Image (cartoon, rainbow, N blue to C red):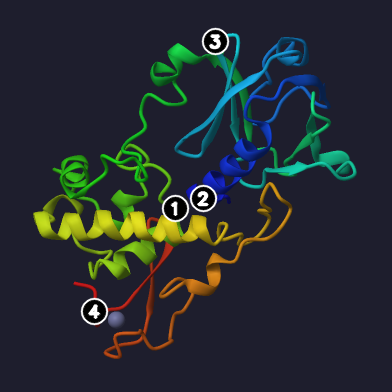
Amino acid sequence: MPELPEVETTRRALERRLDGVAIRHVAQHRADLRVPLPAALPRRLAGRRIAALRRRAKYILADLDDAHSLILHLGMSGRLVFDGPGLGAHEHLTFSFADGTTLRLHDPRRFGLVDLQPTAALAAHPWFRHLGLEPLDPGFDGTALAGALAGKTAALKVALMDQRVVVGVGNIYASEALHRAKLSPRRRAGWLKPAQAERLARALRAVLAEAIDAGGSSLRDYVQASGELGNFQRHFRVYDRAGEPCVCGRAEVRRIVQVGRATFYCPGCQR
Ligand SMILES: [Zn+2]
């Protein structure tokens, strides 16, 4: 599943190519993905110019010049591919732009989402209104994180993956950030000291920023907008390394299961 770094990488690729560019034509090849596509979508998008490309959690938002925003979520297996030949049966939307660029939305498992909503109403929309802190926002720090975690009795790793607390921290990045912050995934989320919360906020930002620099982690079906695979997985310190010695030299990486998801951590340096 594309995680936040992959989505941000995709957003930046889209921004480089499409900021200020007008949509000439949209071909729609099916009526729904996870939810029905907006009525008359091709007609409503034709001729609109892309005024800004933003991201909220794992949603890509293309603000259009008619005060509406095109909302894209890549779901489990969605990807956006520029130019090149058609992608066959799993290509659901094809955007043609005034500068000759083509962008294809490909999503074999169809858990993705496409919507069109008034830009001014996005924050209050059901897709967005429950979402928590944005870890790459300038205001994200230990104080903000501790505030969002206050009172939570869930395990820290489970709470980090709760989108109502902080958005876009998937299974890989939660394990990696906790390792860097030297915090056990099993400790209670609501009981962090200020210094620990600051360490964790910094670790989350660092892990996500490095992943974005590396182009996203691309575990299975994700391919960047450029069509190339990212390579962040080379840098994992604990994720998928059960039984290997931790860099601290004190213990081997252990795999546990929390709420049905695999967690990787080092009992030697994470407390
Ligand atoms: Zn260790």
SS under mark 4: loop
- Which label sits on residue 170? 1
Residue picked out by circle 3: 67
Q: Are marks 1 and 2 in contact (CB under 8 Å)?
A: yes
The verdict on label 2 being within 8 Å of ligand 1 is: no
**Mark 1 → mark 2, Cα distance in angstroms:** 6 Å
**Mark 3 → mark 4, Cα distance in angstroms:** 50 Å
- Which label sits on residue 269? 4
Which of disc 3 and disc 1 is earlier in sequence? Answer: 3
Closest to the camera, between mark 3 and mark 4, is 3
Residue picked out by circle 2: 3
Q: Residues within 10 Å of mark 4 (few under 14, many from 20)?
A: some
**Mark 1 → mark 3, Cα distance in angstroms:** 31 Å
**Quarter the C terminus occupies:** bottom left
Which residue is nearer to you in this view: 8 or 259? 8
Which of disc 2 and disc 3 is earlier in sequence? Answer: 2
Residue type marked 2: Glu
In the rendered image, the vertical position of residue 103 relative to residue 180, given as above or below: above
**Mark 4 → mark 1, Cα distance in angstroms:** 22 Å
The verdict on label 4 being within 8 Å of ligand 1 is: yes
